[in-house]
Image (spheres, rainbow, N blue to C red):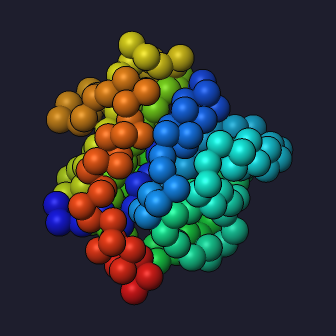
Amino acid sequence: MSEISLVVVGASWGGLTALSQLVAGLPGDFAVPLAVVQHRSWHADNLLASLLQDLTPLRVVDVEDKEPLEPRSIYIAPANYHMMVDDGYLSLTTDPMVRFSRPSIDVTFVSAGDAYPGATVGVVLTGANDDGARGLRHIVDRGGRAVVQDPATAEGKAMPSAALLLVPEADVLPLNEIAAHLVSITASASSRGERKVKG
């Protein structure tokens, strides 16, 4: 992999704690855009973005349709919408639920792998179902990279365990090491990734 243009993160049960630790561990100059899908109820407000913003100097926003991807930004999929990745921006749909979820981690991951083949990192965190596993497989099959939270450190072990069954070659790390790992694997490519996203 020569450069990374996007990091996509999926979380479900226990996600607030996991995302808080991940976001707090990223430096303010983390240039690669990071898109987050957290399962939540369809009527949830934008409190998640507000909570995460308190933990990081990076810009945290709830995604609006056709939201441009910018460096040093964290994008949160809004409740009751699928978040799709296109070349240079994020879009929203109200297509039917996938495996009982909207937003669906698999939907976002598959579109990310297609938009940035070989330049996407997928991260599966804690959760109580198997959403994200198929999408992570797709990212890797398209030349990207996979990171999975060590199930032993996850509040919900089912989701990272399901991801590892489909993507056994994923990098498996305890939660408290994932942010540093993302910095490490994106550092050498961040400036090139920034140009690609903007281009």
Rendered residue at 37%/30% (across/down):
177
Whether residue 98 appears in this view of the structure is no
**Position of 30 relative to 178 (above/below):** below
Rendered residue at 48%/50% (across/down):
27
Q: Residue furthest bottom?
A: 199
Rendered residue at 65%/42% (across/down):
55
> Quadrant of the image for the C terminus?
bottom left
Whether residue 2 appears in this view of the structure is yes
Q: Position of residue 81 (x, y in %)?
A: 67, 56
Q: Residue furthest top?
A: 152
**Position of 23 relative to 159 (above/below):** below
Q: Is residue 4 left or right of residue 96?
A: left
The one of 95 and 45 positioned closer to us in this rendering:
45
Q: Position of residue 80 (x, y in %)?
A: 71, 50
The one of 111 and 155 positioned closer to us in this rendering:
155
The one of 10 and 132 positioned closer to us in this rendering:
10
Q: Position of residue 85 (x, y in %)?
A: 48, 66
Q: Position of residue 175 (x, y in %)?
A: 43, 27
Quadrant in the picture for residue 44? top right
Rendered residue at 75%/38% (across/down):
41
